[in-house]
Image (tube, rainbow, N blue to C red):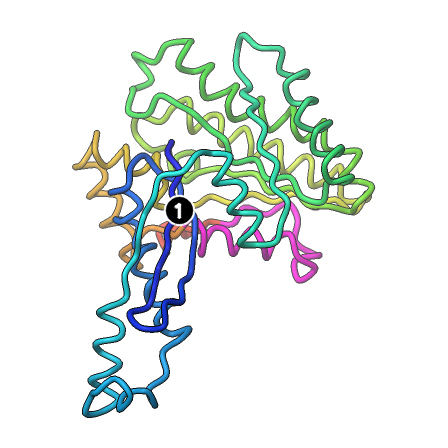
């Protein structure tokens, strides 16, 4: 994974907007559309149609067209530390990053507890737990799936959720917090070549429903999101299995995949908010209409 700083600037006043992004390459960041979005935001921030005569244009429309076309964006690769610092500067937040892999051969309880300890030391409380990590051997049929491949999905997904929920529970109970766990349509609909992934995700859904029942009296809500989003994993799936990718997108009535930040992130914000205070034990399918169930 690489980290990038984006700087969008206007043609005349020299003002700029900045953002950060991460991806496998600069090309991937460009393909995401973020530079174009940032340039549009930059142009709209400082564009004043009344200036058209000042810069020698016949009318406001001609000036506006030029202004938007002339906005530029520079992309620079930065370190992970710089990326985190930039997030803090841009959004006025404190960021803590801790590597913590849950796997078949690790001391997983100690690994997870280290994350919790560092979080409490840095922030003093835990209001929300989001379990989104997952690795798997996609595309391998059940008949040839190895135990190692199955464990990869189970430990990175189901066991990680189990350990983090247990470790965070005392703090979530104190804050009347919320848990959001990620599952998948692969489990809901039995997608080909996804046996371990689907098993882990459906295990997460079952665990979440039990936790929602047990923790409701403590004011802790637990919900599940099943997204169909344009993630790094889906991009890799597109490259490795283009025909299945095309079949998938054809089955989405809205004709696109979810945006991880806007669509999925927005749902996370809602589920953590007071507006969702009566929502618990639910599975939300963000699948553009392809996740319809009776």
Q: Label 1 neighbourhood size at 10 Å, few (<14), some (14-19), many (20+)?
A: some
Q: Is residue 275 magenta?
A: yes
- The local secondary structure at tag 1 comes to strand
Closest to the observer, 124 or 52:
52
Question: For the N terminus, which image quadrant?
Answer: top left
Residue 264 horizontal side relative to residue 246, left or right: right
Q: Position of residue 287 (x, y in %)?
A: 39, 50
The residue where tag 1 is placed is 5
Closest to the observer, 98 or 104:
98
Number of numbered discs overlaid on the protein picture: 1
Q: Residue at x 83, y 41 (%)?
A: 174
Q: Position of residue 145 (x, y in %)?
A: 34, 13
Q: Position of residue 185 (x, y in %)?
A: 41, 40
Q: Position of residue 2 (x, y in %)?
A: 37, 34
- The correct choice, above or below, for 285 with respect to 148 in the image is below
- The correct choice, above or below, for 146 with respect to 121 in the image is above
- The correct choice, above or below, for 114 with respect to 49 in the image is above
Q: Residue at x 43, y 53 (%)?
A: 19
Residue 1 horizontal side relative to residue 199, left or right: left
Closest to the observer, 238 or 63:
63
Residue 65 horizontal side relative to residue 211, left or right: left
Instruction: Tell me if residue 186 can be seen.
Output: yes
Instruction: Tell me if residue 293 can be seen.
Output: no
Q: Residue at x 61, y 45 (%)?
A: 223
Q: Is residue 152 magenta?
A: no
Report the magenta stretch's main SS.
helix
Closest to the observer, 166 or 20:
20
Residue 117 horizontal side relative to residue 34, left or right: right
Q: Which residues are magenta?
A: 260-284
Q: Residue at x 46, y 25 (%)?
A: 199
């Amino acid at each position: 994974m690489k980290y990038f700083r984006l700087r969008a600037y206007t043609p005349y006043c020299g003002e700029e907007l900045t953002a950060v992004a991460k991806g496998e390459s600069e090309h991937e960041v460009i393909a995401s559309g973020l530079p174009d979005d940032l340039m549009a935001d930059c142009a709209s921030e400082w564009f004043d149609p009344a200036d058209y005569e000042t810069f020698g244009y016949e009318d406001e429309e001609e000036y506006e067209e030029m202004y938007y076309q002339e906005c530029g964006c520079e992309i620079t690769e930065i370190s992970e530390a710089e990326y985190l610092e930039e997030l803090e500067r841009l959004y006025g937040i404190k960021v803590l990053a801790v590597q913590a892999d849950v796997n078949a051969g690790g001391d997983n309880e100690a690994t997870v507890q280290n994350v919790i300890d560092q979080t409490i030391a840095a922030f003093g409380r835990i209001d929300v737990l989001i379990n989104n990590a997952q690795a798997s051997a996609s595309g391998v049929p059940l008949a040839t799936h190895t135990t190692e491949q199955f464990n990869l999905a189970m430990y990175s997904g189901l066991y990680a959720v189990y350990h983090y929920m247990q470790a965070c529970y005392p703090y979530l109970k104190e804050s009347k917090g919320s848990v959001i766990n990620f599952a998948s349509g692969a489990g809901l609909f039995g997608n080909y070549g996804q046996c371990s992934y689907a098993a882990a995700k459906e295990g997460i859904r079952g665990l979440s429903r039990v936790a929602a029942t047990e923790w409701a009296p403590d004011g802790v809500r637990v919900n599940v999101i099943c997204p169909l989003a344009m993630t790094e994993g889906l991009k890799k799936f597109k490259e490795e299995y283009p025909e299945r990718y095309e079949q998938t997108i054809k089955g989405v009535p809205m004709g696109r995949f979810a945006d991880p930040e806007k669509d999925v992130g927005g749902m996370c914000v809602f589920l953590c908010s007071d507006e969702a205070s009566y929502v618990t034990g639910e599975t939300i399918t963000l699948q553009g209409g392809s996740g319809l169930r009776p």
